[in-house]
Structure formats: C-alpha cells, structure tokens
Image (cartoon, rainbow, N blue to C red):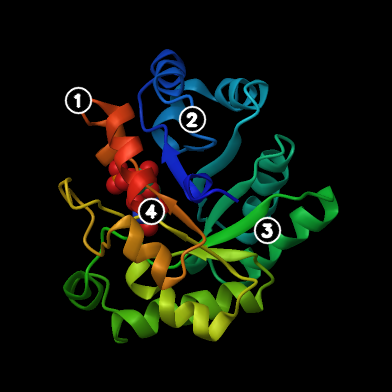
Amino acid sequence: MLPQERIIVPLDVPDLESAIELTKTLPDVTFWKVGLELFVSAGTSILDYLKEQEKRIFLDLKFHDIPNTIEGACRSAMKYNVDLLTVHATAGKEALKAAVKAKKESNSSTKLVAITLLTSINTRELALDLKIPLELPEYTLQMAILAQDSGLDGVVCSPQEVGEIRRVCGENFWLVCPGVRPTFSQKGDQKRVMTPKEALQSGADYLVIGRPITQSETPEIAWQQICQEIAQ
Ligand SMILES: O=c1ccn([C@@H]2O[C@H](COP(=O)(O)O)[C@@H](O)[C@H]2O)c(=O)[nH]1
C-alpha cells in the first residue's frame, strides 16, 4: 500500500454538493470518511457516489446503543459494503458482540472498529467530568482489549496510545487514528495529537486527517505536504 493510501480524509461538510466538490478538489484521496454531519444531511446518496468513484469508505456513525439496535444498524450499514464502520466500545460487550453477529450473518468484509476514547478528551476531562478512575492510557487499552475480546477488527484511538495497544493487541488489529496534526496546523478541539509521521512510526494503520487539509486555503497543497512528509 502507498503511504498516502493510509490517510483517510473526513467529508465533514454540510451537504452532498459540498462533499462532491471536495472529492473533486482532492482527486488523489482514495479513502474518505463519512461522518454524522454529512450522513444526517445527505443520507446514503454519498455512499453511492463514493462507490461509483471507486473510493474506499469509512462510515463513522459511532453507534452507541443497546445490542439489538446496534445489530440492526450494523446490518443496515453493511448493505452498503463500506470498508470501515465505528461503534463505541462503551456500548458494552453485548453490543459489540451484536455488531460482530451482524457482520457474520451479512457475510460482510466491513472492518468493525470501536472508539476507545474520543481524541477530543484529555486526562483531566476523563477523571473530572467522566469520573473514570483509570489513567487515560490504561483506560484506552482496556477499551481496546474489550473490543478485541468481543471480536472486533480494531479500534479508533489517538496516536499517543497506538504503541501500547499495538503491543498488547498484536499486528492483526486495525488501529485507526484521528487526532493527527501536521506541524503547520492548529489542534482545534483535538487534545491527544501527534504529527502524521510520528503516528505512522508509532504503528498506526490509518490516519484520519480532516481540517488541516479540508479547511486549508489550498487543500491540494496541504494534502501534498502531508503525503511528502509521510513518504520520507
Ligand atoms: O476519537 C475520535 C473519533 C473520530 N474522530 C473523527 O475524526 C475526524 C477528525 O477530523 P479533524 O478535522 O482532523 O480533527 C472528525 O471527523 C471526527 O469526527 C475524531 O476526531 N476523534
């Protein structure tokens, strides 16, 4: 796989037209992420469009519900043959297993990945707001182990946790990392970040990089700069 094929760019835009325009601005992007903003607005039409363009799709709807609902939602999503699909690890073991059941029964090749802890949350918020009594790296590792024990294909985590999760969960566990910030860009609401090159060197399989590219005045140049950095 070429290094740039490890970059997933989120289509965090308000409507189908803007999404199509962005894909045309960045024709070399092979893997696009469809998240809540666009999916609520455009529905499955964006999935059909990306398939027609022979792009890979990360459907990042972050399901978090009771097992029966998660199973049905995963079954519906898998009809679109997306490459990656997210559920929250904190939905619990039964819900994660329900997602895996939906995958098996659909005979789907979609990779199911669990959110360990949103990359916008830091140590202080985990302890003081969410009242989680574990250290942040230990908590994210435990969420990854829960996902792996439940039969998921991998997790979404910050690049800062990749090394330890890789060591414990092994090579065949997909580690997908948002919270990636090239040196030229702002962190924004992301709290646990690394540069693209550091994230790959730590062992990430895929990097999700949005605003540093999509909010740039010159998205094509931002994309090329990141591709050059990780290719070196
Ligand atoms: O923990 C998570 C899970 C998902 N995301 C999503 O990734 C992108 C990141 O976009 P940037 O513009 O590069 O910050 C965004 O679509 C999030 O919904 C995440 O950031 N953290």
Secondary structure beneath dot 2 equals loop
Q: Quadrant of residue 200?
A: bottom left
Q: Is residue 195 visible?
A: yes
Query: Mark 4 or 3, which is nearer the eye?
Result: 4
Q: Position of residue 87 (x, y in %)?
A: 54, 56
Q: Residue tagged by mark 4?
A: 230
What is the CA distance from the residue labelled 2 to the residue labelled 3?
32 Å
Q: Residues within 10 Å of mark 1 (few under 14, many from 20)?
A: few
Q: Quadrant of the C terminus?
A: bottom left
Which of pointers 3 and 1 lies earlier in the amino acid sequence? 3
What is the CA distance from the residue labelled 3 to the residue labelled 1?
39 Å
Q: Residue furthest front?
A: 232
Q: Residue furthest top?
A: 17
Disc sitting over residue 6 in the figure: none
Q: Residue tagged by mark 3?
A: 99
Q: Amino acid at mark 4?
A: Ile
Q: Amino acid at mark 1?
A: Glu
Q: Is residue 82 above or below residue 181?
A: above
The response on whether ligand 1 sits within 8 Å of label 3 is no
The response on whether ligand 1 sits within 8 Å of label 4 is no
Which of pointers 2 and 1 lies earlier in the amino acid sequence? 2
Disc sitting over residue 28 in the figure: 2
Query: Mark 4 or 1, which is nearer the eye?
Result: 4
Q: Quadrant of residue 133?
A: bottom left
What is the CA distance from the residue labelled 2 to the residue labelled 4?
15 Å
